[in-house]
Image (cartoon, helix red, strand yellow):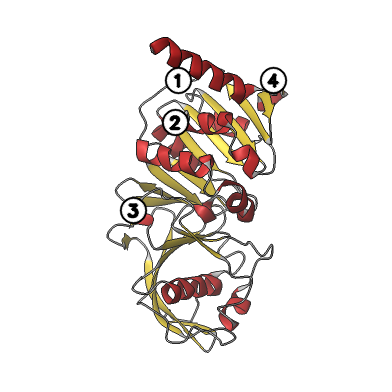
């Protein structure tokens, strides 16, 4: 029986690599290609297994925050760091390896279709990682290519095993239970969303990943202040509360060049040069219907800059600023002195 299982395992490995070939990619590492996937590995070409510490790295896009990646490497315990993406290059490989010289390897796995996401090599590679990071790009690609495939299943399995997971920009957008999926192939501005919370461009995905129960009823956003996204996030929260009765949804939103480093218990710190916003809703909006401006009062906001901390489990922070926002007939106002919504 043991021999039979060994034969089956060998056949699986054979089919996983069928049609694949390796080549040198210079400073990005050794490249292996298969059906709708490209794997580029820099560092030790042999996997190791290390003790990992779970946590989630939320990053808001823009310039990567060095301290955030060092934190993730430390949680990987010197193991193998894997970046996944649907477009782009393997440029994270030398960047992360330079920041984390004690890591065994840094690899980028580009998966460009649902067919690629179903390839055995792809799932096996993800499951071997001691850190998993989802790069920026277009979250619609991630939803179309990875949702309900071995890729999303494997990422959830890593989280259950205690492997740190993170993402930036589009990768950050899919880390919680709810996500703005951008499946209309068009983004939406705050003004457009507040004017009509059922605009066709508002496409909200539910349960792409389940990394932590602390992220239930939560949606993330990124490029937040830079692209003026507060109004659209308030609208997303209103839609979630409207569409899912009894929920009190939360939001975690990061500006560019900034990250929130959350430990397994929900406690985390902010690093980088800008701010992170934690939003909590009072319940369902007063008015949330097609073609009608949103009315949604008393949304709680807690803003934190570098050095501040937040406990997602207790939903309480230190070193930050608390205020409320209200959308009335599509106009967003703030209780802060001066009226700034940020």
Of the residues under marks 2 and 4, which one precedes in the sequence?
Answer: 4
Per the image, the residue denoted by label 4 is: 22
Crowding around mark 1 (Cα neighbors within 10 Å: few <14, some 14 to 19, many 20+) is some
- Residue 213, which numbered label? 3
Q: x, y percentage for residue 125? A: 53, 29
Instruction: Give the SS element for disc 2.
Output: loop
Say which label, 3 or 1, has the lower sequence index.
1
- How far apart are labels 4 and 3 at the CA level? 39 Å
Q: Circle 1 sits in a helix, a strand or a loop, which is it?
A: loop
Q: Quadrant of residue 312?
A: bottom left
Q: Residue furthest top?
A: 3
Secondary element at tag 4: strand
Is mark 2 in CB contact (under 8 Å) with mark 4? Answer: no
Check the picture and name the quadrant holding the N terminus.
Answer: top left
Label at residue 257 = none
Q: Which residue is mark 1?
A: 48
Crowdedness of circle 4 by 10 Å Cα count: few (<14), some, many (20+)?
few
Say which of 87 and 270 sits in front.
Answer: 87
- The residue that label 2 is drawn on is 130
Compare residues 243 and 53 and report the one nearer the observer. 243
Q: Secondary structure at mark 3?
A: helix
């Amino acid at each position: 029986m043991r021999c039979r299982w060994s034969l089956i395992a060998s056949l699986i490995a054979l089919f996983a690599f069928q049609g694949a070939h390796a080549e040198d990619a210079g400073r990005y590492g050794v490249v292996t290609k298969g059906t709708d996937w490209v794997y580029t590995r820099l560092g030790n070409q042999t996997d190791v297994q290390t003790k990992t510490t779970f946590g989630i790295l939320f990053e808001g896009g823009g310039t990567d925050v060095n301290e955030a990646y060092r934190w993730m490497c430390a949680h990987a315990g010197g193991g193998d760091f894997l970046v996944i993406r649907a477009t782009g290059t393997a440029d994270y490989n030398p960047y992360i390896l330079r920041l984390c010289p004690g890591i065994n390897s840094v690899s980028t796995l580009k998966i460009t279709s649902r067919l690629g996401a179903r390839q055995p090599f792809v799932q096996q590679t993800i499951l071997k990682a001691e850190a998993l990071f989802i790069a920026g790009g277009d979250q619609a690609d991630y939803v179309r290519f990875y949702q309900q495939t071995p890729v999303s299943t494997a990422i959830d399995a890593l989280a259950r095993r205690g492997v740190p997971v993170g993402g930036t920009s589009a990768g950050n957008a899919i880390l919680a239970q709810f996500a703005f999926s951008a499946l209309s192939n068009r983004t939406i501005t705050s003004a457009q969303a507040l004017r009509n919370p059922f605009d066709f461009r508002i496409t909200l995905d539910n349960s792409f990943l389940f990394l932590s129960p602390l992220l239930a009823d939560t949606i993330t956003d990124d490029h937040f202040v830079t692209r003026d996204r507060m109004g659209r996030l308030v609208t997303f929260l209103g839609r979630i509360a409207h569409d899912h009765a009894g929920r009190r949804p939360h939001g975690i939103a990061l500006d560019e060049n900034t990250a929130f480093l959350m430990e397994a218990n929900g406690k985390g710190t902010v690093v980088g040069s800008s701010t992170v916003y934690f939003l909590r809703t009072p319940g369902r909006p007063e008015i949330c219907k097609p073609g009608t401006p949103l009315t949604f009062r008393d949304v709680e906001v807690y803003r934190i800059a570098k050095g501040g901390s937040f406990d997602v489990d207790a939903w309480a922070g230190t070193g930050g600023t608390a205020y409320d926002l209200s959308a009335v007939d599509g106009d967003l106002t703030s209780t802060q002195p001066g009226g700034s919504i940020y």
